Amino acid sequence: MNIVPIKSSYIERIKKGYPWVYTHALVTLKQMAEPGELVYLGDNKKKPFAIAYYNPLTKLRCRVLTTNWKMKIDSEFFYHQFSKALAMREKRFNSPYYRLVHAEGDQLPGLVVDRFGDTLVCQTSTAGMEKLKSHWLPALQKLLSPTRVIFRDDVPNRSKEGLPLVVTSPLGELDPIIHVIENSLSYFAAPLDGQKTGWFYDQRANRHWVSAHCKNKTVLDLYTFSGGFGIHAAKSGAKSVTLVDSSQKALDLALLAANANEVLASCEFIKESVFTLLSEYIENGKKFDVVIADPPAFVKQLKHKGAGLRGYQKLAKHCAELVAPGGKLFIASCSHHASSTDFRHAVETGIAKAGRMAKFLRKGGADKDHPIHPLLPENHYLKALLYELN
């Protein structure tokens, strides 16, 4: 392996666990390896101190796999890493439905693995992890003996890494719908063409504590996707739940979940743009006891941060106008470019513009199968807020 020299001012931080090396931390911008190849990181005397994979096509030039530069990166290495990740999840969850690998949070940059019983859905977002598939896939199979493995290798970042966007299955059939168990409820995910891996385990804990506020209440679940919040609310005894999404396929999955959990009678499904429906409801004076809004990221790039925050403010304002006096508003953001402070300020500004007084009740983040790397604030992407409005 080639040695990539790092500027001295960045070495200590990497040794302490910071997993990313940008171009400004390199001694030279000369290409040191091919995209995805393993390299040593070294000091100005070319003494190695870490192993990373390298990509000259991106500003984030190296992603660190280990600070033990004598380590061999092979199937045994990945088996050990996967075993640690599995042990952590098995301590916290009673059934095998969770995120097994959360990229840098599990010291495996560029790799996400969601487990759905005996099905594994993997996403490889970097050239390094793509090149290492011949090592980590056998390690996964040895550890878990899955009957089906699906590669959702269609995340946009792959294009920046020089990789194709594809969905394949090296093991088992490409089933368009798979079963999910969460909080003892049954759901259904679309691993082939749904968002991300087909399901959002990160909101598991938030769905649970929001549902506790829904008994005997009227509930509006916006951006419901496959019904995660709304079905849980219905199962917790909500008087009625209106589930809204612009995707008919997402609503079809939510309908399957409503049937499976025997709550169809209390659920209404609406295919519509959220802001269009909100405007209609506001004009008609519609009110709900609990309003839930879990939108896709409004800030996908840093340069769009201002517009995205204004979008969250607008969403919070419209949602607040629909909350009945004494009711609850839950709103979330998965935009890592918007900090917790930025997001909360946007939401509370929106609530105030709706003429409502708010009592802040709770904040949440991603569930415990999404560990946050302590040196990467970017990992702390999910922000969730709960308010009572007067």
Image (cartoon, grey):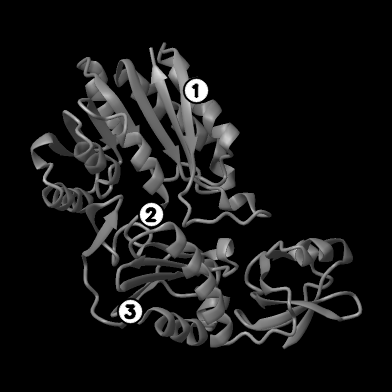
The residue shown at (40%, 83%) is 141
Q: Residue furthest right?
A: 45
10 Å neighbourhood of mark 3: few (<14), some, or many (≥20)? some
Pick the quarter of the image with the N terminus. Answer: bottom right
Which quarter of the picture shows residue 242? top left
Q: CA distance from mark 1 to mark 2?
A: 26 Å
Q: Are marks 3 and 1 in contact (CB under 8 Å)?
A: no
Residue type marked 3? Pro
In the foreground, 59 or 9: 9
Real-space CA distance between mark 3 and mark 2, rounded to the nearest whole angstrom: 19 Å
Whether residue 27 appears in this view of the structure is yes
* Position of residue 203 measured from the top left corner of the image (x, y, whole percent): 39, 47
Residue 156 appears in the figure: no
Q: Mark on residue 146?
A: 3
Instruction: Name the kind of residue labelled 1 in the image.
Output: Glu
| Residues tagged 1 and 2 counted as in contact (Cβ below 8 A) | no
Residue pointed to by mark 1: 348
- Closest to the camera, between mark 3 and mark 1, is 3
- Quarter of the image for residue 42 reads bottom right
Element assignment for label 1: helix
- 1 or 2: mark nearer the eye: 2
Q: Determine crowd level at label 2: few under 14, some 14-19, many 20+ residues with C-alpha closer than 10 A.
A: many
Contact between labelled residues 2 and 3, with CB atoms less than 8 Å apart: no
* Rendering coords of residue 78 (x, y %): 54, 80
Judging from the image, what secondary structure is the residue with disc 2 in?
helix
Residue marked by disc 2:
201
The quadrant in which residue 20 appears is: bottom right
3 or 2: tag closer to the N-terminus: 3
